[in-house]
Amino acid sequence: TDEIIELMKQRGTYLVSTISAGKFTYDKALNEKGYFPAIIVPKVLEMSPKIQESFGRAYKAGVKIAFGTDTGVSPHGDNAKEFVYMVEAGMPEYEAIKSATVSASQLLRISDKYGTIEKGKVADIIAVEGNPLEDISILQNIHFVMKNGQVFKNK
């Protein structure tokens, strides 16, 4: 609500995005009969679409945003879809990426070691083919992963 958005801004509260969870549960409730108990389906169909809309309203109002997915309800590995949903809701690509790096490290109070690429910080880096500022969906296809300075994936 507008009241909650205003309180979040006043108190510096972060909204951790979970649009993916809403999209996943909505799809299951709509397309897979029996996935949820029948009593749950109307609530899922009503509430899930509101997650992306309320995210967009909160972002546009200036609420702090940190990346999240709440993927406990869906298979792991599709987390980067959240970037696409955040951009669809009105967040610029650059801000979506910052929500998963700078903002998330600030929320977790670990920005002294993580969140930006700087001397003295942990070298956790990914690389993709192309420019995610032009097409945020390319973050779903990671070509290179370095964690703490060690390469784990180099495709």
Image: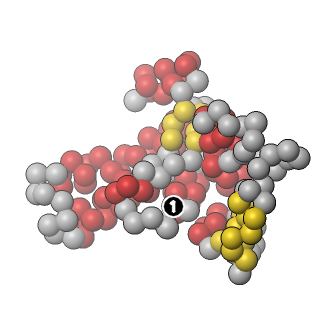
Q: In which quarter of the image is residue 74?
A: bottom left
Which residue is more in the foreground, 89 or 145? 145
Is residue 88 visible from the viewing direction of this image? no
Image coordinates of residue 85 in percent, x first then y, are 51, 57
In the rendered image, the vertical position of residue 34 relative to residue 46, given as above or below: below
Residue drawn at the location 62% of the way across and 42% of the way down: 104
Please provide percent x and percent y for residue 120.
85, 44
Which amino acid, mark 1?
A: Asn
* Pick the front one: 148 or 141: 148
Quadrant that contains the C terminus: bottom right
Neighbor class of circle 1 (other Cα within 10 Å; few <14, some 14-19, many 20+) is some
Quarter of the image with the N terminus in it:
top left
Q: Is residue 64 above or below residue 139?
A: above
Taking the image as shown, residue 95 lies to the left or right of residue 29, namely right
- Quarter-wise, where is residue 110 in the image? top right
Q: Which one is in front, 65 or 118? A: 118
Secondary structure beneath dot 1 equals: loop
- Residue 61: image quadrant is top right
Between 61 and 131, the residue placed more toward the observer is 131
Q: Mark 1 points at which residue?
A: 79
Classify residue 101 as left or right of residue 2.
right
Work out which residue is located at the far bottom of the displayed protein and give it. Answer: 155
Query: Could you tell me residue 3's position as x and y percent?
Result: 43, 22
Q: Residue at x 73, y 77 (%)?
A: 154
**How many numbered marks, from 0 up?**
1
Coloration mode: secondary structure
Q: Report the residue at 31% width, 58% height from top.
A: 25
Q: Is residue 122 visible?
A: yes
Q: In this view, does 71 lie to the left or right of 109?
A: left
